[in-house]
């Protein structure tokens, strides 16, 4: 057994992985530099910016993104209000009983209910449908990849926080 292992080790040592020609060394260095740069770009965490800047600032007023009879949505941070694609924070005021079209968003949503009641029917392939409810001072976590149907039995005020920021392209509305 020792002779077999030694024979394999000797034949493996006959191959030298270090390139000896300068042309090969240049290509090896370029490949390593390109690989390191690509790895750095893919693994670094993007630093969120608000209004294009990474510094403390006050958001003076929200941007009204929806204004219909049953509800208003005022975005404070996000694509529409501050050009921030990493996160969106809004305040939603629902004036009367209504429902939203079903959707399957490509973002995680955290919802803080300030007043009223919010009911969410959640479903996913291979899982039974579940109904979640949150009232004042309760929160919901709605991860991406699920189908949601949101219902409001009456007036409601809540703060949705979406990561990444809400946009119609990733809302998945049906």
Image: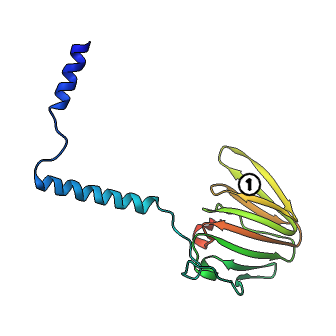
- Position of residue 157 relative to residue 10, above or below, is below
- Name the outermost residue toward the bottom: 60
The percent coordinates of residue 28 (x first, y second) are 21, 53
Secondary structure under the numbered disc 1 in the rendered image? strand
Residue at image location 76% in from the left, 64% down from the top: 111
Residue at image location 60% in from the left, 66% down from the top: 164
Using the rendered view, name the quadrant where residue 167 is placed. Answer: bottom right
- Position of residue 4 relative to residue 58, above or below, is above
Using the rendered view, name the quadrant where residue 33 is placed. Answer: bottom left
Q: Is residue 21 left or right of residue 145?
A: left
- Please, which colouring scheme is shown? rainbow
Residue at image location 80% in from the left, 70% down from the top: 158
Q: Nearer the viewer, residue 90 or 69?
A: 90
Q: Is residue 126 left or right of residue 118?
A: left
Q: Nearer the viewer, residue 29 or 120?
A: 29
Q: Nearer the viewer, residue 142 or 43?
A: 43
Crowding around mark 1 (Cα neighbors within 10 Å: few <14, some 14 to 19, many 20+) is many
- Name the outermost residue toward the left: 21
User: Split into 4 quadrants, where in the image is the N terminus?
Assistant: top left
Residue at image location 22% in from the left, 16% down from the top: 4
The percent coordinates of residue 106 (x first, y second) are 60, 62
User: Split into 4 quadrants, where in the image is the C terminus?
Assistant: bottom right
Using the rendered view, name the quadrant where residue 70 is placed. Answer: bottom right
The percent coordinates of residue 159 (x first, y second) are 76, 71
Q: How many marks?
A: 1
Residue under pointer 1? 122
- Position of residue 18 relative to residue 155, above or below, is above
Q: Is residue 173 left or right of residue 140?
A: left
């Amino acid at each position: 057994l020792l002779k077999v292992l030694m024979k394999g080790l000797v034949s493996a040592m006959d191959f030298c992985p270090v390139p000896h020609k300068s042309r090969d060394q240049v290509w090896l260095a370029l490949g390593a530099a390109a690989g390191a740069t690509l790895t750095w770009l893919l693994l670094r965490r993007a630093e969120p910016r608000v209004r294009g800047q990474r510094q403390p600032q006050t958001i003076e007023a929200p941007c009204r993104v929806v204004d219909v009879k049953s509800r208003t949505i005022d975005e404070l941070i996000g694509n529409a209000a501050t050009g921030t694609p990493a996160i969106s924070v809004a305040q939603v005021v629902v004036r009367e009983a209504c429902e939203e079209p079903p959707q399957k968003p490509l973002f995680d949503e955290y919802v803080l209910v300030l007043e009223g009641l919010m009911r969410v029917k959640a479903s996913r392939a291979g899982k039974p449908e579940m109904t979640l409810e949150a009232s004042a001072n309760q929160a919901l976590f709605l991860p991406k990849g699920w189908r949601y149907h949101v219902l409001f039995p009456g007036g409601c005020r809540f703060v949705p926080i979406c990561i990444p920021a809400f946009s119609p392209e990733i809302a998945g509305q049906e």
